């Protein structure tokens, strides 16, 4: 009886040493792990021990020498000024804090910019006047500041040519205010888009972090219809994405929605007239991974075929951007879900096909604020989280490139 | 197919080990568990086969009287050596937060194994394949002005290990004390606990053992104690932050040392010698 068992084992026995050797080699490779570096992927939460501070992260920038700079708006419950002040955190390439610096500039806007070796941000003084402030990335000291001749800055963006484009709100004329500056921050062109109603209270509550956080943003497009900027702002009673001519800043087209309760939460140009965008309406979120949009005409957001994203939080902020991995181009839409997860939708850039969905669960609520592709082709995501469910703090997540490279079938 | 958390994402087509997707196919999950159990069974089957083959061969070649087989179990205490800490929390005012592991005497685990011994007059070679379970916790703190929050995250790691021991024993009639060295290869068994992903599968250890045999005529007891040094980092560097609870902590680079106390019962395959005439009153 036992021979049935023993005889095959006798046959196998000479190969056991080989199998054991192979197992040891495989184990040795797994133990080695030298190719995995700490800066490839990490999670960091930046805590301030003062419970009365709430930190609202705005933007992240990778420095050429390695490491990151994060900008946050800091809301102090006991402060006399209701608007949050600015705080910068410089980290190493593995996310450890190197220095922090607070500035008496209020309601800093996304995004951080890098100009002539200095890190810059746009914020306002107590009189709502917008300034660009440049700091030395080595220690955070202010090296320069310039008035932007614009009020209530809501978003800032540096284009591929090094020009600064800033969205503000003019409470006198009740208009969205878009200005373009050259590399020396000299005003080149400005345009007012009338809102036709008084939304100053909503804008104030957006700036002082007391009300709804509106998805104001600026981006660039270029196709056969011309090149220019798309700006998400208040215009003609609604929250609307306006396409502007790159030179004159005059509006060429737009996508409008229902008043301020509906809107586009993110948009990116995929190629030519193909755009990918996300939107929200009555608390639900939608994605339009690829749609032909005419930047020279006006259209209703409801005319675009959209897929619902029920998993996303109420009026979820979504960060959209292109991403290259191993010579493949993708469009990423990053947001947060109702079950405290951060979610990344990875679409092919040239089409509307979904390549992958990545989810990272957290103990507490997270709110995505910004992301960048890093020099090592991974991505760094800046979000806000709530330590113990109550203290709002910045969260920086670095994900490796390997996560986004599609598996070969 | 059903969804563990009730959410369907548009891209839930591919599973990525770096981030945990919510969509889980229950059948698939069971299959994985079944596969893991089957793999362990196959390994045990092969080992048993080898043992029997050796036994038969030993019998044929007259080695039977040099073999002993038995089983044993015992307790262990995991001694975590922190090679490089990784803390999720960074304090913006420069304060350093506690980030470490529980002390050795708090980490009580256990093991069960089959014991196979080959011996000559003083030298013994022992294989102790079995299941070795280790328990320890990660300790983290977050400091606020009016409170310090301490977090403890427990771990349970279950390995299938094959320790090989070489012992030199001293003949003291019924007692045969010994001392020796040990090397072991271990493989981390699967678990539904997501935090297990923060550890690599293989583990190599080496250490020293000491103890004594107690000859009870028909069976032999082996009382054994050993300290085993981890030979490498057991943390999975790629997934050190995939603790299943993303914003609480990260797994440090650690070595898993262990203190073991075991008791085994051994059966000789050949009739035992009699040590004394005192018992032979018949």
Image: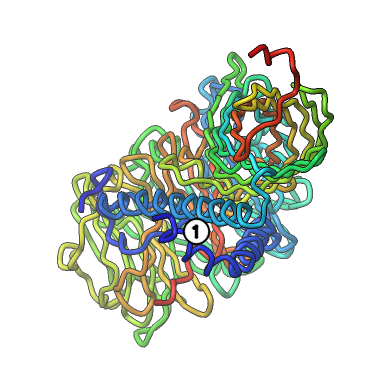
Q: Dot 1: what SS?
A: strand
Which residue corresponds to the image point at 75% horizontal and 19% vertical from the top-left?
B276
Q: Is residue A381 above or below residue B91?
A: below
Q: Is residue A229 left or right of residue B129?
A: left
Q: Is residue B140 visible?
A: no
Residue B176, horizontal then vertical, whole percent: 78, 26
Q: Nearer the viewer, residue B161 or A264?
A: B161
Q: Nearer the viewer, residue A148 or A257?
A: A257
Residue A290 appears in which quarter of the rendering? bottom left
Residue B115 appears in which quarter of the rendering? top right
Q: Is residue B121 visible?
A: yes
Q: Is residue B99 above or below residue B83?
A: above
In the image, farthest residue toward the bottom: A224
In the image, farthest residue toward the front: B282
Callout 1: 10 Å neighbours few (<14), some, many (20+)? many
Residue B158, horizontal then vertical, whole percent: 52, 39
The image's colouring method is rainbow
Which residue corresponds to the image point at 75% horizontal and 39% vertical from the top-left?
B229
Residue B128, horizontal then vertical, whole percent: 62, 41
Check disc 1 and report the residue beneath it. A166
Quadrant of image for the C terminus of chain B: top right
Residue B61, horizontal then vertical, whole percent: 66, 57
In the image, farthest residue toward the left: A303
Image label count: 1
Q: Chain of mark 1?
A: A
Q: Is residue B133 left or right of residue B171?
A: left
Which residue corresponds to the image point at 75% horizontal and 26% vertical from the top-left?
B211
Q: Is residue A375 above or below residue A344?
A: below
Q: Nearer the viewer, residue B148 or A223?
A: B148
Q: Nearer the viewer, residue A364 or B117?
A: B117
């Amino acid at each position: 009886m036992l021979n049935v068992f023993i005889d095959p084992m006798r046959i196998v026995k000479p190969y056991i040493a080989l199998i054991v050797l192979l197992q040891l080699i495989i184990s040795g490779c797994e133990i080695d792990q030298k190719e995995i570096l700490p800066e490839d992927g990490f999670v960091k939460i930046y805590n301030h021990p003062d419970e009365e501070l709430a930190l609202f992260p705005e933007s992240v920038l990778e420095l050429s020498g390695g490491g990151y700079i994060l900008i946050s708006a800091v809301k102090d419950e006991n402060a006399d000024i209701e608007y949050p002040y600015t705080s910068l955190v410089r980290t190493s390439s593995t996310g450890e804090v190197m220095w922090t610096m607070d500035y008496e500039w209020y309601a800093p806007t996304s995004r951080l910019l890098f100009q002539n070796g200095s890190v810059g941000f746009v914020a306002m003084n107590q009189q709502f006047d917008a300034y660009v402030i440049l700091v030395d990335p080595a220690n955070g000291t202010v090296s320069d500041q310039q008035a932007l001749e614009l009020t209530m800055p809501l978003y800032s963006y540096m284009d591929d040519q090094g020009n600064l484009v800033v969205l503000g709100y003019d409470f006198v004329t009740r208009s969205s205010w878009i200005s373009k500056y050259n590399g020396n921050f000299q005003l080149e062109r400005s345009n007012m888009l009338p809102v036709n109603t008084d939304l100053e209270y909503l804008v104030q509550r957006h700036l002082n972090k007391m009300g709804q956080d509106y998805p104001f943003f600026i981006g660039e497009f270029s196709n056969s219809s011309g090149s220019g900027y798309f700006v998400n702002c208040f215009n003609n009673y609604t929250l609307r994405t306006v396409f502007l001519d790159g030179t004159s800043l005059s509006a060429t087209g737009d996508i409008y929605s229902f008043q301020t309760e509906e809107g586009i939460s993110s948009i990116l140009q995929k190629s030519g007239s193909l755009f990918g965008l996300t939107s929200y309406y009555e608390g639900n979120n939608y994605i339009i991974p690829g749609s032909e949009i005419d930047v020279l005409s006006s259209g209703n957001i409801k005319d675009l075929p959209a897929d619902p994203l029920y998993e996303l939080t109420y009026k979820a902020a979504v960060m959209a951007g292109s991403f290259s991995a191993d010579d493949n181009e993708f469009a990423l839409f990053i947001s947060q879900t109702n079950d405290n997860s951060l979610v990344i939708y990875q679409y092919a850039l040239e089409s509307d096909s979904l390549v992958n969905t990545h989810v990272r669960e957290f103990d507490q609520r997270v709110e995505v604020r910004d992301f960048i592709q890093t020099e090592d082709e991974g991505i760094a995501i800046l979000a806000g989280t709530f330590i113990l469910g109550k203290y709002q703090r910045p969260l920086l997540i670095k994900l490796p490139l390997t996560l986004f490279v599609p598996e070969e079938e | 197919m059903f969804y563990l958390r009730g959410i369907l994402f548009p891209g839930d087509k591919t599973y990525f080990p770096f981030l945990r997707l919510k969509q889980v196919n229950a059948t698939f999950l069971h299959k994985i568990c079944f596969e893991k159990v089957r793999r362990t069974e196959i390994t045990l089957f092969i080992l048993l086969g080898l043992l029997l083959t050796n036994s038969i061969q030993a019998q044929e070649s007259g080695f039977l009287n040099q073999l002993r087989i038995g089983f044993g179990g015992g307790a262990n205490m995991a001694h975590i050596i922190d090679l490089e800490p990784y803390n999720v929390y960074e304090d913006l005012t420069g304060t350093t937060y506690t980030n470490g592991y529980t002390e050795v005497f708090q980490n009580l685990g256990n093991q069960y194994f089959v014991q196979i011994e080959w011996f000559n007059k003083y030298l013994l070679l022992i294989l102790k394949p079995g299941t070795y379970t280790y328990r320890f916790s990660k300790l983290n703190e977050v400091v606020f002005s009016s409170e310090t929050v301490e977090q403890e995250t427990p771990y349970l790691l279950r390995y299938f290990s094959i320790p090989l021991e070489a012992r030199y024993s001293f003949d003291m009639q019924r007692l045969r004390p010994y001392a020796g060295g040990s090397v072991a290869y271990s493989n981390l068994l699967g678990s539904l606990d997501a935090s297990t992903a923060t550890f690599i599968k293989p583990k190599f250890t080496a250490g020293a053992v000491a103890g004594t045999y107690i000859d009870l005529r028909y069976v032999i007891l082996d009382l054994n104690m050993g300290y085993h040094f981890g030979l490498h980092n057991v943390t999975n560097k790629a997934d050190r932050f995939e603790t299943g609870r993303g914003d609480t902590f990260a797994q440090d680079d650690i070595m898993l040392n262990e203190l073991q106390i075991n008791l085994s019962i051994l059966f000789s395959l050949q009739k035992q010698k009699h040590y004394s005439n005192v018992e032979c009153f018949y």
